[in-house]
Image (tube, rainbow, N blue to C red):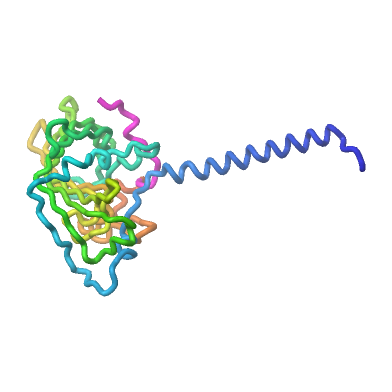
Amino acid sequence: MESINPFIADMKTIFKTFLFIIISMLSFSCFKPKDKQNTVTTHKEAVDTLRVANVPNDSLPKFTFLKDKKILNEVDLSKLLVNTDEFGEYSNNFNGFFGKDNYRIQIYFKKAWKDSLDSKKYHLLGMTNFKGNIDDFEGMIMIDSVFEFVDPIINYNEIYQIPVKTYEIRGKLSMKEDSLDKHAGAFAGTFLMDFSYDSNKTLDYWYYSPNTPVQGGGFKSKGTWKIYAGKLEKPYVFGRDFFMFANNILKDFSFGERDIEINKKYLHLGWDNFWENDEWWAKKPIM
């Protein structure tokens, strides 16, 4: 057997090591943006996939009013309002429509916690972004009523292999921006959320019932913003998965169910950079 020149052997080792590093760098660069891209996963397609066969589209969920509200003592909805995993900063940024022209607004929930004395009350800290004007806010969700519901058009067994119940809370949301900003004001409106709670005590958003008041948005808030200094008022609406109800606000706002495309005629309303990784909430210190 011929002996291998040590210099050639070393060069082969160096080349293999270099090639491994390059491949690793390329793999990481391709993987990381995919996980942290500023996209909203919509659940439109899932609703169709999970439909029970031969059930009319207009079949409505059956609601049962829960007078005792015991479920609120057992669950902590702040774990849904603010995602605390490594990619949570992206899923805590919610989009919506602001003003009569339905211009884009972004609402970022930085912190949320359940009140220690009142299970119907949740506190919020976050930021708003309208046309690049960023304001801190303090907020509160006050739950007025709780319902258990069953949706006849959805096959629950396709989602869960264990017993699960679905609920809707209805209440009020208030968010007060920093009064030191001359553009600031206060948001006041309704707050609706659909969630599931299974026999393992696993809590999650419920997106699969477009015929509830939440319209499959996970949560939805609608109301009015009023400026502090003056009489200016603007309507607003935003939600966890706002694509589920956006087409009811702006006709043909988006197309598709899995790969969402925003209608070009609405891009001038602040949606032209929707797919960019703009971590705007990190550009101004939170209070």
Picture coordinates of residue 228, whole percent (x, y):
11, 32
Going 26% across and 47% down the picture, which residue do you hit?
Answer: 240
Report the predominant secondary structure element of the magenta stretch. Answer: loop
Q: Is residue 152 visible?
A: yes
Figure check: 186 above or below 167:
above
Left or right: 44 as drawn, with respect to 259? left
Picture coordinates of residue 237, whole percent (x, y):
19, 48
Task: Give the quarter of the figure containing the C terminus.
Answer: top left
Quadrant in which residue 21 is drawn: top right
Going 23% across and 34% down the picture, which residue do you hit?
Answer: 112
Left or right: 220 as drawn, with respect to 38? left
Picture coordinates of residue 58, whole percent (x, y):
19, 68
Going 14% across and 37% down the picture, which residue do you hit?
Answer: 119
Q: Which residues are magenta?
A: 274-287
Q: Is residue 129 magenta?
A: no
Figure check: 280 above or below 238:
above
